[in-house]
């Protein structure tokens, strides 16, 4: 048993490193590979961790970490820390080796666990909070579902646009009016719309109202009463039903996201971010997922890296080759882009973000403005009484 453990998490197995003796060089610490295919893998892990041990691991996906965290929760007074990849790399290259493999990473994490136990945790290491991790994963599933459904909705609209143009071009131009007619009265072709307006529109529960009927009349006035092939008509009907069901799912999913971010553990930070103009539940939800429900604990740099607004920089003399970041939660990156765009619009001026954009207007001004907005979001979240009014 050991009071210091470093765990490199994998999909099929994980590597555990620990010091055989207190004075042993970390390069020579022992490692044990534990495979999930062993039905009693958890017993081996519990055998290695003594009560009060300090354990460090990397956040290599919640679904990989959670089984290990659940097992280690059975050990009395055990402290579980997770360490970001950049910190692990820096410590490994400084104290262990410039090479990289599972054993070296496990030894590095064990060394970080010793640093934590000695009261000098490196930057990028923090306590593993199982409740916050599970809450953020629940929200992640909903945010990812919304993103997937939105993409599917766009594809269906494009397909209906093509089929509507094939029947008659004006149907594609007035697509929403046409789609509403399909949904409310099963009207697909111009001939069906003409016949409906002549005979049945005034008795229909929706189109009896002149305000609802008028857009359909305007659309009808721009088309002759042409028919189309029955196969084409059936394809439009099927796609329309799919689109309706998808829009219902999107609305229900958005309502769930809104409910979750206004409850614990997200409520306090959500209330602060909602003071910012343009705030919406989808953007706030994506930022909560990216920061793993810990935006109030993240440093400014950690938050910006999580939401994907920290660039990868490479400078040589006067040449700046700053590149777009490849890390970051994609829905959060989209939220940062759209929210920043909202704030720099003239109708929302003056505000600190828009003013910053105007002051730094140049080739890369928008990227810099997103980073500035990341600092503002992080500062508001970390301030116990943070609001948009405090932004500078």
Image (spheres, rainbow, N blue to C red):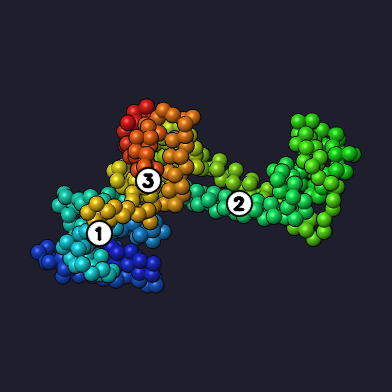
| Measured Cα–Cα span from mark 2 to mark 1 | 41 Å
Tag nearer the camera, 3 or 1:
3
Which of marks 1 and 2 precedes in the sequence? 1
Tag nearer the camera, 2 or 1:
2
Mark 3 near mark 1, Cβ–Cβ under 8 Å? no
| Measured Cα–Cα span from mark 3 to mark 2 | 31 Å
Give 77 or 343, whichever is nearer the viewer: 343
Q: Position of residue 39 (x, y in %)?
A: 39, 70
- Which quadrant holds the N terminus? bottom left
* Left or right, 247 with reference to 32: right
Q: Position of residue 134 (x, y in %)?
A: 41, 50
Residue 14 falls in which quadrant of the image? bottom left
Q: Position of residue 177 (x, y in %)?
A: 73, 41
* Left or right, 15 with reference to 353: left
- Tell me the SS state at disc 2: helix
Give 198 or 296, whichever is nearer the viewer: 198
Mark 3 near mark 2, Cβ–Cβ under 8 Å? no
Q: Disc 1 marks which residue?
A: 88
* Residue drawn 65% across the image and 51% down it: 157
- Residue 46 in view of the camera: yes
- Tell me the SS state at disc 3: loop
Q: Disc 3 marks which residue?
A: 363
> Which residue sits furthest right?
199
Badge number at residue 154: 2
Q: Position of residue 218 (x, y in %)?
A: 78, 37
Q: Residues within 10 Å of mark 2 (few under 14, many from 20)?
A: few
């Amino acid at each position: 048993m050991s009071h210091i453990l470093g765990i490199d998490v994998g999909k099929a197995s994980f590597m555990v490193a620990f010091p055989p003796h207190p004075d042993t060089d970390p390069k020579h610490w022992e490692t044990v590979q534990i495979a999930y295919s062993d039905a009693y893998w958890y017993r081996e892990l519990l055998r290695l961790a003594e009560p009060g041990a300090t354990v460090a691991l990397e956040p290599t996906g919640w679904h990989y970490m959670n089984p290990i965290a659940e097992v280690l929760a059975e050990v009395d007074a055990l402290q579980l820390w997770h360490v970001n990849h950049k910190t692990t790399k820096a410590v490994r290259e400084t104290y262990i080796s410039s090479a990289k493999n599972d054993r070296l990473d496990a030894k590095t994490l064990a060394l970080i666990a010793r640093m934590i136990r000695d009261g000098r945790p490196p930057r990028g290491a923090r306590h593993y909070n199982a409740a916050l991790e599970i809450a953020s994963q629940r929200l992640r599933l909903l945010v990812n579902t919304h993103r997937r459904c939105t993409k599917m909705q766009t594809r269906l609209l494009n397909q209906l646009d093509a089929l509507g143009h094939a029947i008659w071009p004006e149907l594609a131009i007035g697509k929403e009016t046409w789609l509403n007619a399909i949904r409310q009265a099963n009207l697909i072709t111009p001939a069906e719309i003409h016949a409906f307006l002549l005979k049945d529109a005034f008795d229909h529960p929706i189109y009896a109202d002149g305000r609802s009927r008028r857009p359909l009349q305007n659309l009808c006035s721009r088309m002759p009463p042409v028919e189309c092939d029955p196969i084409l008509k059936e394809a439009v009907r099927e796609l329309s039903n799919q689109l309706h069901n998808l829009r219902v799912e999107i609305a229900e999913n958005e309502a769930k996201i809104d409910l979750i971010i206004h409850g614990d553990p997200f409520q306090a930070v959500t209330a602060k971010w909602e003071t910012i103009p343009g705030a919406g539940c989808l953007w706030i939800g994506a930022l909560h997922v990216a920061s793993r429900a810990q935006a109030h604990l993240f440093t400014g740099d950690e938050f910006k890296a999580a939401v994907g607004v920290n660039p990868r920089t490479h400078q040589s003399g006067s040449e700046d080759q700053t590149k777009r970041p490849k890390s970051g939660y994609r829905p959060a990156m989209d939220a940062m882009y759209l929210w920043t765009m909202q704030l720099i619009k003239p109708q929302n001026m003056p505000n600190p973000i828009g003013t910053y954009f105007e002051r730094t207007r140049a080739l890369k001004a928008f990227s810099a403005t997103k980073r500035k907005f990341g600092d503002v979001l992080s500062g508001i979240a970390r301030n116990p009484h943070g609001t948009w009014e405090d932004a500078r």
